[in-house]
Image (spheres, grey):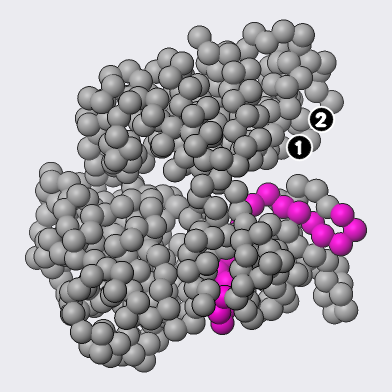
């Protein structure tokens, strides 16, 4: 039986070091000690989240907590059971009942455990144990190759479940995982390049050059008559996208998993702005009425499973050949395969002329790296942009008085799990965005001084820029030239932000 205190002490230790190797070592040490039934709980807590994700507890419920216990007695299983019970509460008296459960739980926790649990429930544990670090630690704890852990997580989509199987059954437990139709995978992500020539040099020739669409990422699962559609954040949106369901049911398959984008097109075939297409996924209005005014078109570009065969490990060229034989051309993302930069550039220019934002250059021999920014996919857009995390915001002046305006931008350091500040921007913000970001950032507030509100690094924004230049002022040694906000990406997790190495690669 593992005590909560051991997790608390490990969390403190890994939060106190920036060394990735030391984090991995400490995590592996505690993971080895967990019983299989404790694995999902321990992995969640050490990843700074509850196993249940949300249990309906906010700041108000955590005020005036009881005096701390003198001795650590709480086990992981007991704490998780209490959180499960709290999360199930509903109805008129649920708030009082939730408070009663919390008081009883905290009366049994030491001061250190109380502090950890409060931060855990409020999403304020920041210890740098991102999923990549946890996967490394689990591989070390189990004594298996990292590739085995990555593949199991890719097809299962749940690191806690993989840890439980590995601790219970060893390597055989990991190899038993197979892609399950109906259970979404994290989508593969793309790296960035400034030119098609640079991207082709990195992927080797020939390469596939494909439209990069400014729509909503979708993953479509078909199993017999059952169709389910998921977003990039793995939310089930099947009931909101009947066009995609009808397309999937028309396919000559028994089971399939497709990756693609969905967007709304204008009458001339040009794409609607991202915000317009994305509104179809969040709206609760009548679906038939929305479909009539804002129909969606699917653009499928990958196949991960077909009729009982998992395809994620197959080369991209083979997967696309299977896709072309399965999905009609009108539903596939247009692309060419070429070794010639001039032909690829011409395809890019034609794509831009049609109103799309750029191209993806894809290595023909690449496997599908779910949840990773794989080297086999490289995006090229004429307007350079990065997905960065907001670290803080300064109060505005003049007509922006009362609004949080000047944003502090951070790129992910995958070694430490922290975010490296690249500079600030207040450009590109409309009045509507200013109002929205002020409300959202205040919800994420960690602390403040007279001028600045520092926030939990959870909000991702797409930032356009004209270039990257050296700057000793910032810890990454670089800053963005003419950075401006394009849009907020609440569909993206902080772990999906661009890395500091990606930003540094743009520097001359």
Compared to residue 372, the image places residue 201 above or below, namely below
Residue 97 on image: x %, y %: 70, 22
Residue 38, image x and y in percent?
Answer: 46, 19
Q: Residue 291, how many percent across, how many down?
A: 39, 71
Residue 334 vertical position relative to residue 393 in the rendered view, above or below: below
Per the rendered image, the range of residues in magenta is 449-468
Question: Is the Cβ of the residue at disc 1 closer than 8 Å to that at disc 2?
Answer: yes
Neighbourhood count class around disc 1 (C-alpha, 10 Å): few under 14, some 14–19, many 20 upward: few
Mark 2 residue element: loop
Residue 63, disc: 2
Q: Give the residue drawn at x 81%, y 18%.
A: 66
Near-viewer residue (391 or 275): 391
The answer to whether 293 appears left or right of 435 in the picture is left
Judge left or right: residue 166 versus residue 484.
left
* Relative vertical location of residue 222 with respect to residue 20 in this rendering, above or below: below
Q: In front here: 279 or 400?
A: 400
């Amino acid at each position: 039986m593992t005590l909560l205190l051991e997790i608390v002490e490990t969390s403190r230790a890994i939060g106190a070091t920036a060394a990735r190797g030391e984090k991995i070592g400490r995590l592996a040490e505690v993971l080895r000690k967990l019983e299989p039934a404790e694995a999902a709980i321990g992995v969640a807590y050490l990843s700074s989240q509850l196993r249940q994700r949300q249990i309906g507890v906010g700041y108000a419920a955590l005020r005036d907590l009881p005096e701390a216990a003198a001795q650590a007695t709480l086990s992981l299983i007991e704490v998780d059971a209490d959180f499960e019970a709290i999360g199930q509460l509903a109805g008129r008296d649920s708030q009082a009942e939730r408070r009663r459960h919390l008081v009883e739980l905290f009366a049994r926790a030491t001061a250190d455990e109380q502090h950890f649990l409060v931060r855990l429930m409020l999403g304020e544990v920041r210890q740098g144990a991102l999923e990549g670090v946890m996967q490394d630690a689990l591989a070390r704890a189990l004594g298996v190759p990292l590739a085995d852990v990555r593949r199991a997580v890719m097809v299962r989509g749940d690191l806690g479940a993989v840890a439980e199987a590995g601790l219970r059954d060893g390597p055989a437990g990991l190899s038993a995982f197979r892609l399950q139709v109906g259970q979404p995978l994290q989508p593969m992500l793309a790296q960035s390049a400034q030119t098609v020539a640079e991207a082709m040099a990195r992927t080797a020739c020939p390469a596939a050059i494909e439209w990069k669409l400014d729509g909503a990422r979708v993953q479509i699962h078909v199993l017999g008559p059952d169709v389910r559609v998921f977003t990039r954040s793995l939310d089930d949106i099947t009931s909101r996208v009947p066009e995609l369901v009808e397309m999937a049911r028309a396919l000559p398959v028994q089971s399939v998993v497709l990756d693609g984008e969905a967007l709304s097109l204008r009458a001339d075939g040009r794409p609607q702005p991202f915000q317009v297409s994305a509104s179809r996924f969040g709206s609760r209005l009548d679906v038939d009425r929305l479909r009539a005014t804002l129909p969606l078109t699917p653009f499928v570009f990958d196949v991960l499973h077909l009729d009982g065969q998992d395809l994620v490990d197959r080369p991209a060229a083979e997967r696309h050949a299977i896709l072309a034989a399965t999905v009609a051309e009108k539903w596939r993302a247009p692309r060419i395969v070429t070794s010639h930069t001039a032909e690829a550039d011409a395809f890019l220019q034609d794509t831009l002329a049609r109103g799309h934002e750029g191209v993806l250059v894809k290595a023909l021999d690449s496997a599908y790296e779910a949840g990773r920014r794989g080297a086999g996919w490289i995006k090229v857009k004429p307007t350079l942009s990065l997905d960065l995390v907001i670290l803080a915001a300064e109060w505005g002046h003049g007509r922006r008085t009362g609004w949080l305006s000047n944003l502090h931008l951070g790129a992910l350091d995958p070694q430490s799990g922290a975010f490296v500040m690249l500079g600030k921007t207040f450009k590109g913000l409309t009045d509507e965005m200013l109002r929205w970001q002020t409300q959202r950032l205040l919800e994420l507030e960690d602390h403040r001084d007279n001028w600045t509100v520092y926030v939990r690094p959870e909000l991702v924004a797409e930032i356009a820029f004209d270039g990257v230049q050296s700057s000793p002022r910032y810890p990454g040694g670089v800053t963005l030239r003419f950075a401006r906000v394009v849009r907020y990406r609440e569909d993206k997790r902080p772990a999906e932000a661009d890395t500091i190495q990606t930003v540094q690669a743009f520097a001359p």
